[in-house]
Amino acid sequence: MKKRKLGAIILLIILIVFGIRLISQEDGWICVDGDWVEHGVPNSEKPTGYCIEGKVNNFKECLAEGNPIMESYPRKCMHLNETFTEIIEHFCTQENTGEVCTNLYNPVCGYALKETFSNSCFACQNKDIIYWIPGECI
C-alpha cells in the first residue's frame, strides 16, 4: 500500500512538471538564418546586434561577438582559432581630400591614428589618415 501511494505521488509530480512545461511559453527572440525572429510574445525589443548562430564568418561578426581587435593595418579580429581581416571600404584619396568640409556631424574613426573626426572630409584632410570607418573610435 505504501509503495502504491509513493508511486502515485511520484507520478503526480512528474505530470505536474510536464504540464507546467507544456503550458508555459518561452518568450524571446531567437536567431533563424541570420535574422532575429519572435518566439512567443517577447517582453523586450528586437535585438539590434548581429544575429549569429554560433559561427563567426567575417570581421564584423567577430567584432560583434566582442572579440579583441588587433591593432594592425588592416585590423584583424581573432575568434577561437580563426583570424578575420577587416575589409576596408573607405579610403582617403585625392578626390575626397577637398579643402572645404561641411560641419555636418557624422563621426568617423580615422586610421592609422585611430582618431575620431566629425566627418570623413575632416578625416581625409589629415595627411596621416589612410582610411576611415563609420562611427567614433572605440
Image (cartoon, rainbow, N blue to C red):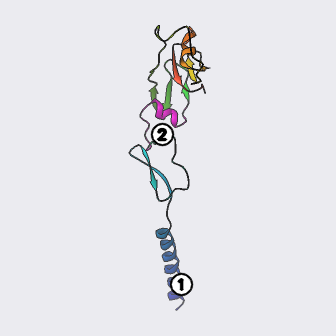
Relative to 109, say whether 22 is above or below.
below
Along the viewing direction, whichever of 25 and 97 lies nearer the viewer: 97
Q: What stretch of residues is rendered in magenta? A: 53-67
Asked whether residue 66 is drawn in magenta, I would say yes
Coordinates of residue 68 in the picture (x, y in percent): 56, 30
Residue 122 has which mark?
Answer: none
Coordinates of residue 11 in the picture (x, y in percent): 49, 80
Figure quadrant of the C terminus? top right
Along the viewing direction, whichever of 31 and 100 lies nearer the viewer: 100
For label 1, the crowd category at 10 Å Cα-Cα, with few meaning under 14, some 14 to 19 and many 20 or more, is few
Foreground mark, 1 or 2, reads 2
Coordinates of residue 81 in the picture (x, y in percent): 46, 32
Distance from the alpha carbon under mark 1 to that under mark 2: 51 Å
Reading the image, the residue beneath label 1 is 6
Q: Name the residue located 47 percent from the left edge and 10 percent from the top edge.
A: 93
Q: In the image as oriented, which residue stretches furthest toward the left? A: 33
Coordinates of residue 34 in the picture (x, y in percent): 41, 43
Q: Which of pointers 1 and 2 lies earlier in the amino acid sequence?
A: 1
Residue 106, quarter of picture? top right
For label 2, the crowd category at 10 Å Cα-Cα, with few meaning under 14, some 14 to 19 and many 20 or more, is some
Q: Of the residues shown, which amino acid type is indicated by label 1?
A: Leu
Label 1: state its secondary structure.
Answer: helix
Q: Name the residue located 38 percent from the left edge and 45 percent from the top edge.
A: 33
Question: Principal SS element in the magenta part?
Answer: loop
Asked whether residue 103 is drawn in magenta, I would say no
Query: CB under 8 Å between callouts 1 and 2?
Result: no
Relative to 43, say whether 77 is above or below.
above
Reading the image, the residue beneath label 2 is 50
Q: Name the residue located 50 percent from the left edge and 67 percent from the top edge.
A: 24
Q: Of the residues shown, which amino acid type is indicated by label 2?
A: Tyr
